[in-house]
Image (tube, grey):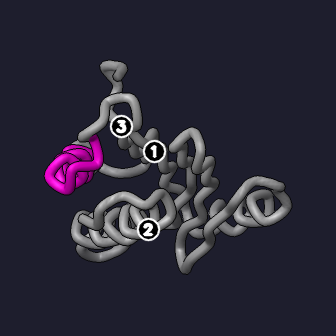
Amino acid sequence: MSNELPIRLIAPALPPQTLARTTAWANFETLKANWYGDEEKVADIEIEVVSPERFDTLLKDYQNEQSLVVEQHGFALRLNVPQLKVSGVMALDVDEPKLAKTFKLRVKKVLLVVAASLSLPSI
């Protein structure tokens, strides 16, 4: 296993403290759910947080791809199930009231979909 965290959230527009706390929370919750019991089979997850306008553009790209894509309201994921790799985009308005809470809830929603898609325990 590398020194890089299994779940990475990329969100330059978010306050750094919100991003750091939510990333730590996501990695801890998945650790508690035993996603990392076998170090040879650790999911590699990277989610980019973008504006709703940018999301609409990226979603069209995702829909044109040949890879397995899961699309739900506000996010889209590319899944490589055999390699346990997930990359995705999530729409989030940084002017959203209660930004930190909204961000955490959306990350949890993504992780629930990832768990189901990769046959991992739910968080």
Between the residue at mark 3 and the residue at mark 1, the CA separation in whole angstroms equals: 6 Å
User: Mark 3 = which residue?
Assistant: 6
Mark 1 residue type: Ile
User: Residue visible at 23% across and 42% down?
Assistant: 20
Q: Nearer the viewer, residue 93 or 20?
A: 20
Q: Nearer the viewer, residue 106 or 114?
A: 114
User: Mark 2 = which residue?
Assistant: 116
User: Mark 1 = which residue?
Assistant: 45
Magenta stretch bounds: 22-36
Between the residue at mark 1 and the residue at mark 2, the CA separation in whole angstroms equals: 14 Å
Residue 42 in picture, x, y percent from top left: 38, 38
| Vertical arrangement, residue 110 with respect to residue 23, above or below | below
Main secondary structure along the magenta-highlighted residues = helix
User: Residue visible at 55% across and 62% down?
Assistant: 51
Total number of numbered labels? 3
User: Residue visible at 24% across and 46% down?
Assistant: 27
Mark 2 residue type: Ala
